[in-house]
Image: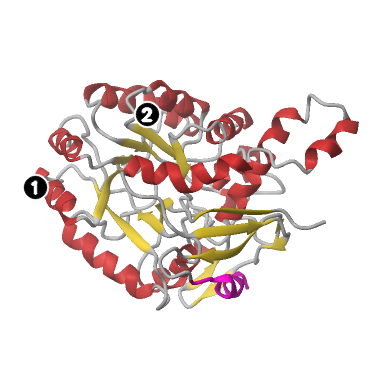
Amino acid sequence: MESLRLSIVQPDDWHLHLRDGNGLASVAPHSASVFKRAIVMPNLKPPITTLSQALAYRERILKALPPDSTFTPLMTLYLTDDTTTSEIKLAKKSGAVFAVKLYPAGATTNSQAGVTDLFGKCMPVLEEMARSSLPLLVHGEVVDTSVDIFDREKVFIDTILSPLVTKLPELKVVMEHITTRDAVEFVESVTSGNVAATVTPQHLLLNRNAIFQGGLQPHFYCLPVLKREHHRQALIKAVTSGSNKYFLGTDSAPHEKRAKEASCGCAGIYSAPVALPLYAQVFEEASLDSFLSLVPTIVLELICFQAGALDMLEAFTSLNGPNFYGLPANKGTVTLVKTPWCVPTAYSFESGTVVPIFAGKTIQWSVESVINGEDSCEKKNELESLRV
């Protein structure tokens, strides 16, 4: 039987960590080989808080790419209590900065310089962002240690995000890497069209049991942490519903193996090399997840070869994000093929060894080719070389 193939508009990654220095040069080609554009996170050391820093980082990213790459980094600023309205105006005018990132101080990796007074010191900046149509990207977790880690997203919505959207309904907000049914319900409840969400492959494929099965699994540890199964099912239902409020954001976050497999391991999952095939798996299996407990076993063989929600994949990966950001969809295409392959156990870089999600496991989909809409350059050989 001929392998199932699917061609879609070339996707973008609306939440990506590229790091800096040798680490940047190591991981950037993985994202650039498949994605046309990416919203690049600003939580470096020191963080990217000004336009001049963002432009300098953008140049470092471009220099780290393969010579023939057409990948475009979309830069962001790191919001602090000291960010000024003049900086926001400069960032918007530059055409290089596409959003501002809210990290509650201490919420995740390199967030120590984040916001402590959102409704006080930051309000003039948020008002200027609303006037400028510059989106606010939100890491949606409270940092109060008295709140259970599995409840921090819901509490953030109730105490911070919902009041913010009520106060500034014209502010465009992306709730990044949502993990709960509560987040889905909040996004759906906002009818202005100014609130959207990104969803990662790990939160669509895994629940919190994965962190503890067969011992502690550090390469399944990320923030926000994986949640219960009913939350995972709510995310799948949301992204395959056809709603334009959800789009691809891998939150691919590389850490060296020794930093993950440590007594105090880093939070973050490296998914860039396998993200798009994993999303295809989610969308193919979406309808199966709903029916497995409802149909007789004899019927399963009739369902297993069906495409599930694959017809919804292109909108999620390639159309909804540009629409929210007011950008055109890409002109190129990516062809996925249902051909099993084994994810490498690790990627050895000059900067260190990085273990990808599902290392050593066989996944069912792969990227067969990328055809860039600008130069019609097929990158099949490059993709093959990046796998090994």
For the residue marked with disc 1, what is the amino acid?
Ser
Label 2 and label 1: CA atoms lie apart by 28 Å
Query: Mark 2 sits on what residue?
Result: 156
- In this rendering, position of residue 106 left or right of residue 341: left
Q: Is residue 250 magenta?
A: no
Query: Mark 1 sits on what residue?
Result: 86
**Region in magenta:** 377-388
Which quarter shows the C terminus? bottom right
Element under label 2?
helix
User: 269 or 27, which is in the foreground?
Assistant: 27
Question: Residue visible at 39% across and 68% down?
Answer: 70
For the residue marked with disc 2, what is the amino acid?
Phe
Q: Quadrant of residue 18?
A: bottom left
Element under label 1?
helix
The secondary structure that dominates the magenta segment is: helix
Packing grade of label 2 (10 A; few <14, some 14-19, many >=20) is: some
